Amino acid sequence: MPVVTYLNIVHTYISMISNSYLVFSKMVTSFFSIYGSHVVQAPQSGSLQNQKTRRSHHCKMGDNVDLEKCFEVVSNLVSEAGRLIARNNETRQEFVTKSNDIDLVTQTDKDVELLLMDGIRRHFPDHKFIGEEESSGEEGVKNLTDDPTWIIDPVDGTMNFVHAFPHSCISVGLKVNKVTELGLVYNPILEQRFTARRGHGAFYNGRRIHVSGQKELGKSLITSEFGTTRDEAKMKVVNENFEKMAKRAHGLRVLGSAALNMSMVALGAADANYEFGIHAWDVCAGDLIVREAGGVVIDPAGGEFDIMSRRVLAAATPELAQEITKVLTQFYPLPRDD
Protein backbone atom coordinates (compact mmCIF):
# COMPACT_ATOMS: atom_id res chain seq x y z
CA MET A 1 0.00 0.00 0.00
CA PRO A 2 1.40 3.42 -0.88
CA VAL A 3 2.57 5.52 2.02
CA VAL A 4 0.28 8.40 1.11
CA THR A 5 -2.78 6.19 1.13
CA TYR A 6 -1.78 4.70 4.50
CA LEU A 7 -1.36 8.16 6.04
CA ASN A 8 -4.79 9.23 4.76
CA ILE A 9 -6.44 6.23 6.42
CA VAL A 10 -4.70 6.94 9.76
CA HIS A 11 -5.75 10.59 9.59
CA THR A 12 -9.35 9.56 8.96
CA TYR A 13 -9.39 7.26 12.00
CA ILE A 14 -7.86 9.94 14.21
CA SER A 15 -10.51 12.44 13.08
CA MET A 16 -13.29 9.98 13.82
CA ILE A 17 -11.96 9.28 17.34
CA SER A 18 -11.56 13.01 18.02
CA ASN A 19 -15.11 13.79 16.89
CA SER A 20 -16.50 10.94 19.00
CA TYR A 21 -14.69 12.26 22.06
CA LEU A 22 -16.13 15.75 21.53
CA VAL A 23 -19.67 14.34 21.19
CA PHE A 24 -19.19 12.25 24.33
CA SER A 25 -17.89 15.25 26.28
CA LYS A 26 -20.87 17.33 25.27
CA MET A 27 -23.25 14.54 26.32
CA VAL A 28 -21.62 14.25 29.75
CA THR A 29 -21.71 18.02 30.29
CA SER A 30 -25.36 18.18 29.27
CA PHE A 31 -26.27 15.28 31.56
CA PHE A 32 -24.76 16.87 34.67
CA SER A 33 -26.23 20.28 33.89
CA ILE A 34 -29.72 18.73 33.87
CA TYR A 35 -29.47 15.94 36.44
CA GLY A 36 -26.49 16.94 38.53
CA SER A 37 -28.62 18.03 41.53
CA HIS A 38 -30.16 14.56 41.69
CA VAL A 39 -26.98 12.51 41.39
CA VAL A 40 -26.25 10.64 44.60
CA GLN A 41 -22.83 11.46 45.97
CA ALA A 42 -20.88 9.65 48.62
CA PRO A 43 -21.38 11.39 51.98
CA GLN A 44 -18.49 13.28 53.42
CA SER A 45 -17.03 12.14 56.71
CA GLY A 46 -19.43 12.92 59.54
CA SER A 47 -22.23 14.24 57.26
CA LEU A 48 -24.75 11.51 58.27
CA GLN A 49 -24.24 12.28 61.93
CA ASN A 50 -24.66 15.99 61.21
CA GLN A 51 -27.97 15.28 59.43
CA LYS A 52 -29.20 13.25 62.39
CA THR A 53 -28.19 16.05 64.73
CA ARG A 54 -30.04 18.63 62.65
CA ARG A 55 -33.15 16.43 62.48
CA SER A 56 -33.12 15.96 66.22
CA HIS A 57 -33.69 19.68 66.68
CA HIS A 58 -36.98 19.38 64.76
CA CYS A 59 -38.20 16.17 66.41
CA LYS A 60 -40.15 15.81 69.62
CA MET A 61 -41.00 12.76 71.64
CA GLY A 62 -43.68 10.73 69.87
CA ASP A 63 -42.73 11.61 66.28
CA ASN A 64 -41.99 7.94 65.65
CA VAL A 65 -45.50 6.77 66.64
CA ASP A 66 -46.83 4.26 64.12
CA LEU A 67 -50.05 6.06 63.23
CA GLU A 68 -51.08 3.40 60.70
CA LYS A 69 -50.99 0.78 63.42
CA CYS A 70 -52.73 3.11 65.88
CA PHE A 71 -55.56 3.67 63.42
CA GLU A 72 -55.92 -0.03 62.66
CA VAL A 73 -55.91 -1.06 66.33
CA VAL A 74 -58.42 1.54 67.48
CA SER A 75 -60.71 0.93 64.48
CA ASN A 76 -60.99 -2.74 65.41
CA LEU A 77 -61.53 -1.93 69.09
CA VAL A 78 -64.21 0.65 68.29
CA SER A 79 -66.05 -1.91 66.14
CA GLU A 80 -65.97 -4.39 69.03
CA ALA A 81 -67.14 -1.78 71.52
CA GLY A 82 -69.86 -0.68 69.10
CA ARG A 83 -71.38 -4.15 69.12
CA LEU A 84 -71.63 -3.94 72.90
CA ILE A 85 -73.38 -0.56 72.75
CA ALA A 86 -75.77 -1.63 69.99
CA ARG A 87 -76.72 -4.77 71.89
CA ASN A 88 -77.36 -2.86 75.12
CA ASN A 89 -79.27 -0.09 73.37
CA GLU A 90 -82.13 -2.47 72.61
CA THR A 91 -83.57 -1.85 76.06
CA ARG A 92 -83.53 1.08 78.48
CA GLN A 93 -80.47 1.06 80.72
CA GLU A 94 -79.94 1.38 84.44
CA PHE A 95 -77.70 4.29 85.37
CA VAL A 96 -76.19 6.24 88.22
CA THR A 97 -75.63 9.98 88.42
CA LYS A 98 -72.28 11.74 88.65
CA SER A 99 -72.24 15.51 89.26
CA ASN A 100 -76.04 15.90 89.09
CA ASP A 101 -79.24 14.10 88.12
CA ILE A 102 -78.72 14.61 84.37
CA ASP A 103 -75.00 13.76 84.31
CA LEU A 104 -75.28 10.01 83.90
CA VAL A 105 -73.07 6.95 83.68
CA THR A 106 -74.03 3.35 82.89
CA GLN A 107 -72.18 0.08 83.22
CA THR A 108 -71.83 0.16 79.43
CA ASP A 109 -69.87 3.45 79.65
CA LYS A 110 -67.43 1.77 82.03
CA ASP A 111 -67.22 -1.48 80.06
CA VAL A 112 -66.58 0.28 76.75
CA GLU A 113 -63.90 2.55 78.18
CA LEU A 114 -62.17 -0.43 79.79
CA LEU A 115 -62.34 -2.41 76.54
CA LEU A 116 -60.80 0.45 74.57
CA MET A 117 -58.09 1.33 77.07
CA ASP A 118 -57.03 -2.25 77.77
CA GLY A 119 -56.92 -3.01 74.05
CA ILE A 120 -54.80 0.05 73.31
CA ARG A 121 -52.45 -0.66 76.24
CA ARG A 122 -51.73 -4.15 74.88
CA HIS A 123 -50.29 -2.60 71.73
CA PHE A 124 -49.00 0.71 73.09
CA PRO A 125 -48.11 0.30 76.78
CA ASP A 126 -46.44 3.72 77.04
CA HIS A 127 -49.41 5.72 75.75
CA LYS A 128 -51.44 7.96 78.07
CA PHE A 129 -55.22 8.36 78.40
CA ILE A 130 -57.77 11.06 79.11
CA GLY A 131 -61.20 9.45 79.28
CA GLU A 132 -64.59 10.55 80.56
CA GLU A 133 -64.94 7.86 83.20
CA GLU A 134 -61.18 7.49 83.75
CA SER A 135 -60.72 11.23 84.30
CA SER A 136 -63.89 11.87 86.27
CA GLY A 137 -62.46 10.23 89.39
CA GLU A 138 -60.29 12.02 91.90
CA GLU A 139 -57.11 10.38 90.57
CA GLY A 140 -57.98 10.78 86.91
CA VAL A 141 -55.29 12.08 84.58
CA LYS A 142 -56.32 15.29 82.85
CA ASN A 143 -53.04 17.03 82.05
CA LEU A 144 -52.27 16.95 78.34
CA THR A 145 -48.56 16.42 77.62
CA ASP A 146 -46.47 15.75 74.50
CA ASP A 147 -46.82 12.00 75.12
CA PRO A 148 -49.11 10.06 72.77
CA THR A 149 -52.48 10.51 74.50
CA TRP A 150 -55.81 8.88 73.69
CA ILE A 151 -58.82 11.06 74.55
CA ILE A 152 -61.90 8.87 74.86
CA ASP A 153 -65.62 9.24 75.41
CA PRO A 154 -66.95 5.66 75.60
CA VAL A 155 -70.59 6.68 75.17
CA ASP A 156 -71.18 10.26 74.08
CA GLY A 157 -74.88 10.85 74.48
CA THR A 158 -75.49 8.76 77.59
CA MET A 159 -78.87 10.40 78.17
CA ASN A 160 -79.93 9.18 74.72
CA PHE A 161 -78.46 5.76 75.44
CA VAL A 162 -80.38 5.16 78.68
CA HIS A 163 -83.61 5.99 76.85
CA ALA A 164 -82.71 3.83 73.80
CA PHE A 165 -82.79 6.97 71.64
CA PRO A 166 -80.51 6.01 68.72
CA HIS A 167 -78.07 8.94 68.83
CA SER A 168 -75.10 7.79 70.92
CA CYS A 169 -71.54 7.22 69.82
CA ILE A 170 -68.00 6.30 70.73
CA SER A 171 -65.55 9.18 70.34
CA VAL A 172 -61.79 8.53 70.25
CA GLY A 173 -58.96 10.91 69.39
CA LEU A 174 -55.19 10.50 69.53
CA LYS A 175 -52.91 13.44 70.24
CA VAL A 176 -49.13 13.33 69.75
CA ASN A 177 -47.14 16.38 70.83
CA LYS A 178 -50.55 17.91 71.65
CA VAL A 179 -51.60 17.68 67.99
CA THR A 180 -54.60 15.53 67.10
CA GLU A 181 -53.42 12.87 64.64
CA LEU A 182 -56.52 10.70 64.28
CA GLY A 183 -60.17 10.73 65.27
CA LEU A 184 -63.09 8.31 65.15
CA VAL A 185 -66.75 8.90 65.96
CA TYR A 186 -68.95 5.82 65.66
CA ASN A 187 -72.69 5.50 66.21
CA PRO A 188 -73.16 1.72 66.12
CA ILE A 189 -76.94 1.90 66.39
CA LEU A 190 -77.32 3.69 63.05
CA GLU A 191 -73.98 2.44 61.65
CA GLN A 192 -72.54 5.93 61.26
CA ARG A 193 -68.73 5.90 61.28
CA PHE A 194 -66.77 9.14 60.91
CA THR A 195 -62.99 8.93 60.66
CA ALA A 196 -60.08 11.27 60.02
CA ARG A 197 -56.31 11.28 60.01
CA ARG A 198 -54.39 14.54 59.96
CA GLY A 199 -53.59 15.42 56.39
CA HIS A 200 -55.61 12.53 54.93
CA GLY A 201 -59.14 13.96 54.87
CA ALA A 202 -62.38 12.99 56.63
CA PHE A 203 -64.62 10.04 55.80
CA TYR A 204 -68.16 8.82 56.51
CA ASN A 205 -68.52 5.04 56.21
CA GLY A 206 -65.48 5.06 53.94
CA ARG A 207 -66.69 7.90 51.70
CA ARG A 208 -64.77 11.18 51.57
CA ILE A 209 -66.81 14.05 53.05
CA HIS A 210 -66.69 17.85 52.95
CA VAL A 211 -68.38 20.65 54.84
CA SER A 212 -71.23 22.55 53.18
CA GLY A 213 -69.31 25.74 52.45
CA GLN A 214 -72.17 27.85 53.79
CA LYS A 215 -71.16 31.41 54.75
CA GLU A 216 -74.47 32.97 55.82
CA LEU A 217 -76.09 32.38 59.21
CA GLY A 218 -79.56 32.97 57.79
CA LYS A 219 -79.12 29.97 55.49
CA SER A 220 -77.46 27.72 58.09
CA LEU A 221 -78.62 24.73 60.11
CA ILE A 222 -77.03 25.02 63.56
CA THR A 223 -76.54 22.31 66.20
CA SER A 224 -75.99 22.80 69.92
CA GLU A 225 -76.85 21.27 73.31
CA PHE A 226 -78.40 22.09 76.67
CA GLY A 227 -75.50 20.28 78.34
CA THR A 228 -75.23 18.09 81.43
CA THR A 229 -75.66 20.75 84.12
CA ARG A 230 -78.59 22.86 85.24
CA ASP A 231 -76.47 25.62 86.69
CA GLU A 232 -78.67 28.74 86.69
CA ALA A 233 -76.05 31.06 85.20
CA LYS A 234 -75.23 28.63 82.42
CA MET A 235 -78.87 27.84 81.63
CA LYS A 236 -79.58 31.55 81.26
CA VAL A 237 -76.84 31.81 78.60
CA VAL A 238 -77.94 28.57 76.87
CA ASN A 239 -81.56 29.74 76.58
CA GLU A 240 -80.50 33.21 75.48
CA ASN A 241 -78.36 31.78 72.70
CA PHE A 242 -81.09 29.38 71.60
CA GLU A 243 -83.43 32.35 71.30
CA LYS A 244 -80.90 34.33 69.28
CA MET A 245 -80.20 31.43 66.93
CA ALA A 246 -83.89 30.62 66.48
CA LYS A 247 -84.37 34.17 65.17
CA ARG A 248 -81.31 34.32 62.92
CA ALA A 249 -80.47 30.82 61.69
CA HIS A 250 -82.32 28.75 59.11
CA GLY A 251 -82.83 26.03 61.72
CA LEU A 252 -81.61 24.72 65.08
CA ARG A 253 -81.08 21.06 66.05
CA VAL A 254 -80.12 19.23 69.26
CA LEU A 255 -78.93 15.63 68.74
CA GLY A 256 -77.87 14.96 72.32
CA SER A 257 -74.22 14.20 71.41
CA ALA A 258 -71.47 16.79 70.96
CA ALA A 259 -69.37 14.41 68.85
CA LEU A 260 -72.26 13.65 66.50
CA ASN A 261 -73.16 17.35 66.27
CA MET A 262 -69.62 18.13 65.10
CA SER A 263 -69.65 15.16 62.73
CA MET A 264 -72.81 16.52 61.11
CA VAL A 265 -70.90 19.72 60.34
CA ALA A 266 -68.13 17.66 58.72
CA LEU A 267 -70.72 15.74 56.71
CA GLY A 268 -72.28 18.97 55.42
CA ALA A 269 -75.63 18.05 56.99
CA ALA A 270 -75.28 20.89 59.51
CA ASP A 271 -73.42 24.15 58.93
CA ALA A 272 -72.17 24.95 62.43
CA ASN A 273 -72.10 23.67 66.00
CA TYR A 274 -71.41 25.59 69.20
CA GLU A 275 -71.46 24.56 72.83
CA PHE A 276 -70.35 25.72 76.28
CA GLY A 277 -69.60 23.13 78.96
CA ILE A 278 -68.37 20.24 76.84
CA HIS A 279 -65.19 18.33 77.74
CA ALA A 280 -62.04 17.38 75.85
CA TRP A 281 -63.32 13.83 75.27
CA ASP A 282 -66.50 15.19 73.67
CA VAL A 283 -64.72 17.18 70.98
CA CYS A 284 -61.20 15.80 70.39
CA ALA A 285 -62.18 13.50 67.52
CA GLY A 286 -64.84 15.85 66.15
CA ASP A 287 -62.37 18.73 65.98
CA LEU A 288 -60.09 16.82 63.61
CA ILE A 289 -62.96 15.38 61.57
CA VAL A 290 -64.39 18.87 60.93
CA ARG A 291 -61.03 20.37 60.00
CA GLU A 292 -60.13 17.46 57.70
CA ALA A 293 -63.50 17.95 56.00
CA GLY A 294 -62.51 21.53 55.22
CA GLY A 295 -64.23 23.28 58.12
CA VAL A 296 -62.93 25.45 60.95
CA VAL A 297 -62.92 24.94 64.71
CA ILE A 298 -62.36 27.98 66.94
CA ASP A 299 -63.23 29.39 70.35
CA PRO A 300 -66.81 30.76 70.41
CA ALA A 301 -65.39 34.24 71.08
CA GLY A 302 -63.34 34.08 67.88
CA GLY A 303 -59.93 33.05 69.19
CA GLU A 304 -57.97 29.85 68.79
CA PHE A 305 -59.66 26.62 69.87
CA ASP A 306 -58.46 25.38 73.28
CA ILE A 307 -59.48 21.76 73.84
CA MET A 308 -59.28 22.16 77.62
CA SER A 309 -61.45 25.30 77.76
CA ARG A 310 -64.80 23.45 77.52
CA ARG A 311 -65.88 25.80 74.73
CA VAL A 312 -66.17 25.06 71.01
CA LEU A 313 -67.44 26.50 67.75
CA ALA A 314 -67.19 24.44 64.57
CA ALA A 315 -68.35 25.83 61.25
CA ALA A 316 -68.29 25.16 57.53
CA THR A 317 -66.43 28.41 56.79
CA PRO A 318 -64.46 31.10 58.63
CA GLU A 319 -67.05 33.67 57.54
CA LEU A 320 -69.90 31.75 59.18
CA ALA A 321 -67.86 31.11 62.31
CA GLN A 322 -67.08 34.81 62.73
CA GLU A 323 -70.72 35.78 62.19
CA ILE A 324 -71.79 33.38 64.92
CA THR A 325 -69.20 34.76 67.37
CA LYS A 326 -70.85 38.18 67.01
CA VAL A 327 -74.23 36.75 67.97
CA LEU A 328 -73.39 34.44 70.88
CA THR A 329 -73.60 35.43 74.52
CA GLN A 330 -70.36 34.10 76.00
CA PHE A 331 -69.97 31.71 78.92
CA TYR A 332 -66.74 30.40 80.45
CA PRO A 333 -67.29 27.06 82.27
CA LEU A 334 -65.25 26.27 85.35
CA PRO A 335 -63.26 24.31 86.18
CA ARG A 336 -61.34 23.84 82.94
CA ASP A 337 -60.43 20.30 81.94
CA ASP A 338 -56.81 20.85 82.89
Image: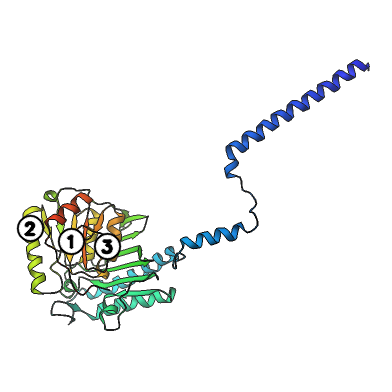
Image point (41%, 67%), residue name: 70
Looking at the rendered image, the disc whose residue lies closer to the viewer, 3 or 1, is 1
Residue 296 percent across, percent down from the top left: 25, 55
**Numbered tag placed on residue 58 in the rendering:** none
**Residue indicated by mark 2:** 244
Amino acid type at circle 3 is Gly
Quarter containing the N terminus: top right
Secondary structure of the residue carrying numbered label 2:
helix
Q: Is residue 143 left or right of residue 39?
A: left
**Residue indicated by mark 3:** 286
Secondary structure of the residue carrying numbered label 1:
strand
Separation (CA) of disc 2 from disc 1: 13 Å
Residue 157 percent across, percent down from the top left: 20, 70
Secondary structure of the residue carrying numbered label 3:
helix
Residue 40 percent across, percent down from the top left: 61, 48
Bin the neighbour count of mark 2 within 10 Å (Cα to Cα): few under 14, some 14-19, many 20 and up.
some
Bin the neighbour count of mark 1 within 10 Å (Cα to Cα): few under 14, some 14-19, many 20 and up.
many
**Numbered tag placed on residue 274 in the rendering:** 1
Going from N to C along the chain, the mark reached first, 3 or 2, is: 2
